[in-house]
Image: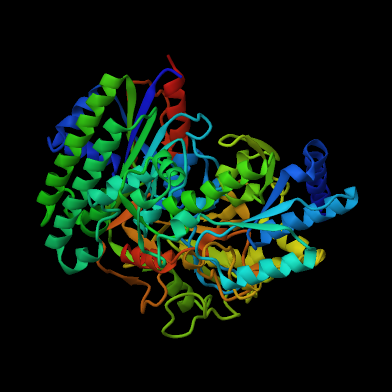
Amino acid sequence: MAKKAVIIGIDGVPCSLLKAYMDQRIMPGLREIVAEGNLMPMRSTLPEVSSVAWTSFMTGEPPAEHSIFGFMEIDKNSYQYVFPNFTSIKSPLFWEGLNVPTIAFNIPQTYPARPMNGVMVSGFVAPDLTKAAYPQRVYDYLKAMDYRLDVNSRLAAEDPDAFFKDLFQTFEKRTEAIRHLFTSEDWRIFIAVITETDRLHHFFFDSAFEGRYHEVFADFYNRLDSLLRELFLRSKKDGAVFFTCSDHGFTNITTEVYVNRLLMEKGLLDLPSGATNLTGIGAGSTAFCLDPSRVYMHLKGKYSRGSVSPEDYEKTRNQVKDVFESLAYNGRKVVKKVFLKEEIFSGPYSQDAPDLYVMGEPGFDLKSSVGKNSVFGLSAFRGAHTYEDAHFLASGCTIPEDNISIENVAGLVLRSISED
Amino acid sequence: MSIDEKVAKSISVIREAIEKTGVENMSIAITGGKDSTTNLWLFKNACEEMGVRLPVCMFIDEGDVFDEISEFVEHMKRLWSLKIEVIKNRDVSSKAGGIGDIVQVASLNETNKAAIAEMGFSGADFEFIPDSTVCNHLMKTVPMREFIVKNGIKVLSTAIRWDEQSARKKEEYFSPRENPEHTRLHPILHFSERDIWIAIFKYDIPYNKLYRTGYRSLGARCATGKASDVPAWMQDLEHTPERVGRGQDKEKVMEQLRTLGYM
């Protein structure tokens, strides 16, 4: 194998934002990198959430192959939430076959950490640092330098200034750890993901281009730019190919759309009043939703209280599809497309895929949200994920393809390091 | 493959190992869990067919064993006349009064110090938390190596399965290992989690009562939580992760997801 590869993941960073920031001179370092490479928009996965998209990044496979469809599933008997973790991924990771020393730092969906050829530091959701690092010497280092697994997002709604302080401190620790691993560990493939951007975007994306907190964006992205430039120059010196990519894009929110509330209002979902989860689901329910907008038909035989019979599946599913397609907000169409399971999921785990997947028009942030009083509303969030407008940047190698998705990245990286 | 065919396949793998090595130089790792008990049952069948005694069983006491597991292993010992060696890294466990106590690296013997160095651990002390990275290495790997060397074990059988996690997909029935040199025998690789329960009920293989109360996977007591209140075999095995109940992570995960707007 000829080369080393460096991939810096930046969670939730749109291609359009990077282009704007380069034009506005917020990211001069990126301009240098792009001048020697290729920046292009990229599609996420469906669903366009981080756990699914980063798993597709790691495996080079779609959800029906690697089996991660979202951050949570439900137990089909008890309807309690279950949370897939790193052990749930059913496909090998793209670096495992090569068996070369690899650093896998802060990639979402890699908790708990497990032994590998190289270093693993788990990414979101990682509740416990003692299970989030391999090997032991890396845990010791992270503990000693007061590493932070994630930004304290609870602060965002309560106290924006405290949130921003925490954001910058977390990013500083992230940067320090990345530098340490880059210089002190042996590696052929170096992967590090910055997740601070996603946290900032969730709560303050309306300030990304102008507005009350735009200075915070400019400051943060300027620092990110310095880090990217530093890693790019080091990569060049090392003869490594250099990539950055995100897992999805971001856009402003017009309104949130609470899917389980909509199903309840249409008589398709029966939950007790005051319900905070799906464990009280009534037997007569036709369908329910898991984040972000995965809709499952409440099939008899599949779920312990399921009542939709297999003969009625197609007809009932189409009824549910109609509900979404006809949904309007102030005269505007809310839903861009309702995908049927078989249209977008194919692989050994497609039976675990949602029966319907609903994609909103830009600005409509669909959420499962049990326990809301109305279909539409706003909360602390000012940014929503997008399927389009993620980004992919490659430098030091040629990428002739366009119209790529995050599932293609693994193959592109592997190809680039085997070229002479 | 039907369950009978899967059983037959495992037994043929075990027979091949016994024919090549002989039961005196083999050992079966048991934990009191459903997989190793099923593996043991398969060995029992193979040995009865071949007219040989069962190899010695190796049980690792990692420092915080469920009472129910100790009782169950005792019960199996009587039921199947097993020869069981319980191994424990007493040099480490004797330095800790309880779970979470600090152990000084300097107070350990040379073997343990070397094991710590080999992990790349450079701290002067560590917390005694069974199932953590350091403790796993010291409480499981170190005594296992000593056991293999002391008893001249050429083949050690464990109950890993391909479907447990993607890293296991490359494992083979016969897997050579070093430090010390021996062969690992994995007769039930091709069993899924569901197959284990099918076999347990079809062939009436004993299983630990903890599974009935909702535990799906059994590790050290302090590190294992219930996955659900429903018996393990009635849980959604195919679509929920097996080890999700281990550790007290679930509540923290929910809280972090909620803060980002999920659920």
Q: What is the residue that sits farthest to the bottom in this orientation?
A: A273
From the viewer's perspective, tell me whether residue A171 is left or right of residue A109.
Answer: left
Q: A76 or B70: which is nearer to us?
A: B70
The quarter of the picture where residue A364 lies is bottom left
Residue B164 drawn above or below residue A27: below
The C terminus of chain A - image quarter: top left
Residue at image coords 89%, 50%: B51
Res A299 → quadrant:
bottom right
Instruction: Please give left or right for residue A217 compared with residue B170 in the image.
Output: left
Q: Residue at x 25, y 53 (%)?
A: A201
Residue A386 position (above or below residue A414): below
Asked which colour scheme the image uses, the reply is: rainbow
Q: Position of residue B71 (x, y in %)?
A: 65, 72
* Residue B72 on image: x %, y %: 67, 69
Q: Is residue B185 visible?
A: no
Residue at image point 61% right, 38% down: B170
Q: Position of residue A180 (x, y in %)?
A: 25, 37
Q: Determine the residue located farthest toward the top in the rendered image.
A: A420
Image coordinates for residue A280, horizontal then vertical, percent:
52, 80
Residue B174 versus residue B241 in the image, above or below? above
Looking at the rendered structure, the number of numbered marks drawn on it comes to 0
- At 62% from the left and 68% from the top, the residue drawn is B70
Q: Nearer the viewer, residue B180 or A99?
A: B180
Q: Quadrant of residue A31?
A: top left
Residue B71 visible, this orientation: yes
- Whether residue B34 sits left or right of residue A410 in the image: it is right
